[in-house]
């Protein structure tokens, strides 16, 4: 199979790229080269900015692919560009949408591909919905061979998945646990969440590549392990060998009281604050051998091993830490006044 990825060095695409090359497929990447250390050995690299459509079109002259996948399309205009570039060059175009596009608030915590798409809280999700609608119209009217993939919270060994973190990532939450400080958990920590390790995601994704039954379909790819946010944070603390000190704060208060540029309203109210349990029947019908094998506690061990060996992953976030201290103090003061 000859595949072209736009990107190829992100959390999701890195695992897919590595597995494809291990299986002997021919992989091409359109990449700006800003993360050369993450480029998989053996891939053919087209060094270009995908937004420079004219240059990319020249570099693609004479090329045809079995699969083209765009991991960096966030707005419909980028997909219109992809259609112009690849409509005559691929047998399948895969768009990476998002499970955050599903209806918020949910009418049923059990989610399958028939769950309505509507998210008034997060522009990111609304753009993903608009992208899906555009591609499905092109499929119906022009025969553009699209497959839509909806990941939920997919993670890798490079970053710990937590509910609330700042712009520098999740390491500061680990740091707070190690320092014995309180960790902010949205709501009461009992809402349900699904986490998928990127190598498991890759197994499902590759099963959709070149799969004629996936054309014209939207498919979610997640594991089947469901945890509460309390369990997620407890597993992390246990792996660190420390006691978890939670500070429960309503998602609305977190969203209203955090800097606007952190966009925690979208990330929480439009995503993580909602209980989600995914029905992966469709994926398993299309990819019968799909199974997620990395339990969350195993994934946490992989993450800690990796970040302990890679100092660049231990990126502290003093601004987020101060904000957490402020929220914790405000919460404790409010409780003290209520008891008076």
Image (spheres, rainbow, N blue to C red):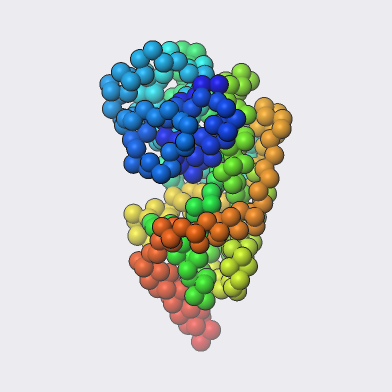
- Quarter of the image where one finds residue 234: bottom right
So how many labels did they put on this image? Answer: 0
* Relative to 15, 76 lies left or right: left
218 over 139 or under it: above or below: below
- Across and down, in percent, residue 69 comes to 47, 28
- Which percent across, then down, holds residue 82? 39, 23
Residue at left offset 32%, top offset 30%: 48
Residue 145 location, x and y as percent? 51, 18
- Left or right of residue 82, residue 98 in this image: right
The reply to whether residue 143 is in sight is yes
Residue at 48% x, 78% y is 332
Query: In the displayed structure, would residue 214 be above or below residue 174?
Result: above
Q: At 48% from the left edge and 18% from the top edge, which residue is drawn?
A: 65
Residue 83 in percent (x, y) is at 40, 20
Q: Nearer the viewer, residue 312 or 316?
A: 312
Residue nearest the viewer, comparing 151 with 240? 240
Q: What residue is rendered at 49% in x and 40% in y?
A: 14
Q: Is residue 80 visible?
A: no
Residue 12 vertical position relative to residue 319 in the rendered view, above or below: above
Residue extending furthest front? Answer: 42
Position of the N terminus by quadrant? top right
Query: Looking at this view, is 21 or 87 the one in front?
Result: 21
């Amino acid at each position: 199979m000859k595949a072209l990825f736009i990107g190829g060095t992100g959390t999701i695409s890195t695992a897919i790229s590595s597995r494809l090359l291990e299986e002997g497929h021919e992989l091409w990447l359109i990449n700006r080269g800003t993360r050369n250390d993450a480029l998989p050995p053996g891939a053919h690299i087209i060094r270009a900015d995908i937004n420079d459509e004219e240059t990319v079109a020249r570099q693609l002259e004479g090329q045809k692919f079995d699969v083209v996948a765009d991991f960096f399309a966030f707005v419909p205009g980028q997909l219109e560009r992809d259609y112009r570039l690849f409509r005559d060059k691929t047998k399948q175009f895969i768009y990476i949408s998002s499970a955050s596009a599903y209806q918020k608030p949910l009418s049923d915590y059990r989610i399958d591909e028939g769950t309505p798409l509507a998210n008034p809280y997060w522009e990111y999700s609304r753009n993903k919905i608009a992208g899906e609608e555009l591609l499905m119209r092109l499929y119906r009217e022009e025969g553009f061979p699209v497959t839509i993939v909806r990941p939920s919270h997919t993670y890798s060994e490079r970053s710990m998945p937590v509910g609330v973190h700042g712009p520098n990532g999740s390491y500061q939450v680990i740091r707070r646990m190690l320092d014995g400080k309180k960790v902010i958990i949205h709501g009461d920590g009992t809402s349900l969440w699904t986490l998928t390790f990127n190598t498991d995601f890759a197994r499902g994704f590759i099963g959709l590549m070149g799969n004629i039954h996936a054309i014209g379909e939207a498919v979610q790819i997640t594991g089947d392990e469901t945890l509460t946010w309390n369990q997620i944070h407890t597993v992390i603390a246990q792996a660190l060998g420390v006691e978890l000190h939670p500070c429960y704060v309503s998602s609305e208060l977190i969203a209203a009281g955090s800097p606007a540029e952190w966009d925690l309203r979208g990330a929480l109210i439009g995503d993580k604050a909602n209980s989600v349990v995914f029905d992966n029947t469709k994926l398993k019908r299309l990819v019968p051998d799909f199974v997620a094998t990395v339990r969350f506690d195993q994934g946490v061990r992989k993450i800690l091993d990796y970040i302990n060996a890679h100092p660049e992953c231990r990126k502290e976030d003093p601004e987020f830490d101060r904000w957490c201290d402020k929220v914790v103090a405000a919460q404790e003061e409010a409780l003290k006044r209520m008891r008076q």
